[in-house]
Image: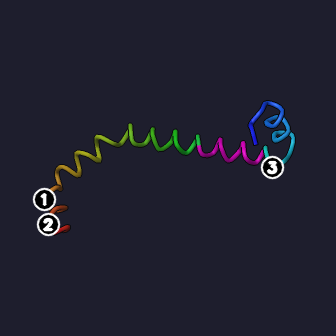
């Protein structure tokens, strides 16, 4: 089934389409929060892992 503007409009009028749109917005919001957290804390986590690299490798092997 092709996605046409009419089909999208019908989905949005229908409760199912609105729910789908809400879920899509939630997924986008979660992705933005994850990307922001990685950007904010990525360097700090990297430094901690580099400092503890020896202990991590010993624990793995």
Q: Is 38 displayed left or right of 4 in the figure? A: left
Badge 2: few (under 14), some or many (20 or more) residues near its Cα, within 10 Å?
few
The residue under the point 38% across, 37% down is 39
Is 23 inside the magenta-drawn segment?
yes
**Residue closest to the far front:** 1
Q: Separation of disc 2 and disc 3 at Cα?
A: 52 Å
Depth check, front residue: 61 or 7:
7
Q: Is 12 displayed left or right of 37 in the figure? A: right
Residue position for label 3: 16
What is the magenta range? 18-27
Q: Is 26 displayed left or right of 43 in the figure? A: right
The answer to which image quadrant residue 2 occupies is top right
Q: Which mark is residue 58?
A: 2
Contact (Cβ within 8 Å) of mark 1 with mark 2? yes
Tell me residue 34's x, y (percent): 47, 44
Is 46 inside the magenta-drawn segment?
no
Label 2 residue SS? helix
Depth check, front residue: 52 or 35:
35
Badge 3: few (under 14), some or many (20 or more) residues near its Cα, within 10 Å?
few
In front: label 2 or label 3: 3
The residue under the point 83% across, 32% down is 6
Q: Is 59 displayed left or right of 35 in the figure? A: left
**Residue closest to the far top:** 5
Residue position for label 1: 54
């Amino acid at each position: 089934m092709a996605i046409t503007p009419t089909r999208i409009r019908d989905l949005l009028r229908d409760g199912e389409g609105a729910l789908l749109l809400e879920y899509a917005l939630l997924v986008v919001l979660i992705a933005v929060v994850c990307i922001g957290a990685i950007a904010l804390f990525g360097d700090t986590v990297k430094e901690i892992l580099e400092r503890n690299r020896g202990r991590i490798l010993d624990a793995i092997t």
